[in-house]
Image (cartoon, helix red, strand yellow):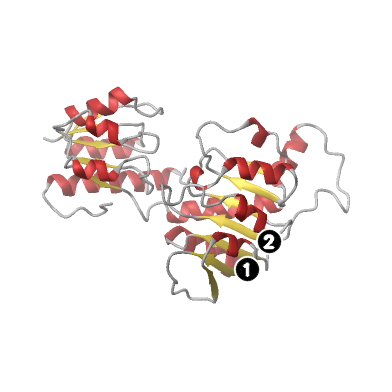
Amino acid sequence: MPKVLIARNLPDSVVDEARALFDVTYRDRPDPMSEAEMISSLRDYDAVLPTLGDLYAASIFAAVPDPRCRLLANFGVGYNHIDVAAARAAGIAVTNTPGAVTDATADIALMLMLMSCRRAAEGERLVRAGKWEGWHPVQMLGLHLSGKRLGIVGMGRIGQAIAHRCHYGFGMTVAYSSRSRKDLPYEATRHDTAAALAAEVDILVAAVPGGAETRHMINASVFEALPGHAHFVNISRGDVVDESALIEVLERGGIGGAGLDVYEHEPDVPERLKALERVTLLPHLGTATLEVREDMGRMAVANLKAFFAGEDLPNPV
């Protein structure tokens, strides 16, 4: 029976399913693996089920020149924490869990858009602090979302799910930037760059994968291009955004606000960012529902099962 390491605490149903198929060692903890644990995982197990924060850098693979491990079945659609090229060079396949996360992540994007535009987090803090003095006609005026211009940086599965909700649910016009033109069931304008897109929208959403190609794709030039009333939302990866540039534009009131579910150096969130009223900050809740996490886990287990059965991997990266 293949020996498999589950590197983080997962829903019980996922662990039970894996235990029925494999000789499972369950690291039932929320914190990422240490460098020593990752080196051990490659040396002592036939496969590993890691997730975000388990930083399988090239140095980890280099430390185990003849690994026993032959598969990293990543729990999550994003895999920029794994040096895939180094894994392949070591003879280790990598899979992920696309599809399962799409709707939940799109829902979080809509929630952040509404919270930021309608100043919901700011209002909740006001009530909790006992400082609310009652309704009046110009209290905490925000931006009406319906009918506004939406811009999406990255029009993949998640970007399209966000656009679908916004267009059909809120009557928003859609524009996007991406490497290729998309065939969409509604009119949408494509721009070549994120900055060109930003200049034309009321809400800008980052929905690109993480990694070297997209690091700081959303930078000072993008924020300078946004209209002063516009809001920015990030549900992709934290390092897609130049966080210092975002803080600077927010501090001087250069844009209307921001809604963030991810951060450049998670779990560290800059004090300057936390001090800003016009920012909604969530603790990476994008896929945080039991149903979605179970679906992600089952997809990871399916990748493991196919691998050890000698079948084509359902979700190779």
Amino acid found under the numbered disc labelled 1? Met
Does any portion of residue 8 appear in the rendered image? yes
Does any portion of residue 6 appear in the rendered image? no
Q: Residue furthest front?
A: 221
List x then y, in percent, for residue 91. 16, 42
Are discs 1 and 2 less than 8 Å apart at CB?
A: yes
Q: Residues within 10 Å of mark 1 (few under 14, many from 20)?
A: many
User: How many labels were placed on the picture?
Assistant: 2
Q: CA distance from mark 1 to mark 2?
A: 8 Å
Relative to 66, is 176 on the left or the right?
right
* Residue closest to the eye, 26 or 213: 213
Secondary structure found at label 1: loop
List x then y, in percent, for residue 59. 28, 31
List x then y, in percent, for residue 219. 57, 50
Q: Residue at x 38, y 29 (%)?
A: 32
List x then y, in percent, for residue 88. 21, 45
Secondary structure found at label 2: loop
Relative to 139, is 111 on the left or the right?
left
Q: Which residue is mark 2?
A: 145
Q: Residue at x 58, y 41 (%)?
A: 243
- Residue 15, picture quadrant: top left
Q: Residues within 10 Å of mark 2 (few under 14, many from 20)?
A: some
Q: Quadrant of the image for the N terminus?
A: top left
Q: Which residue is mark 1?
A: 172
Relative to 121, is 102 on the left or the right?
left
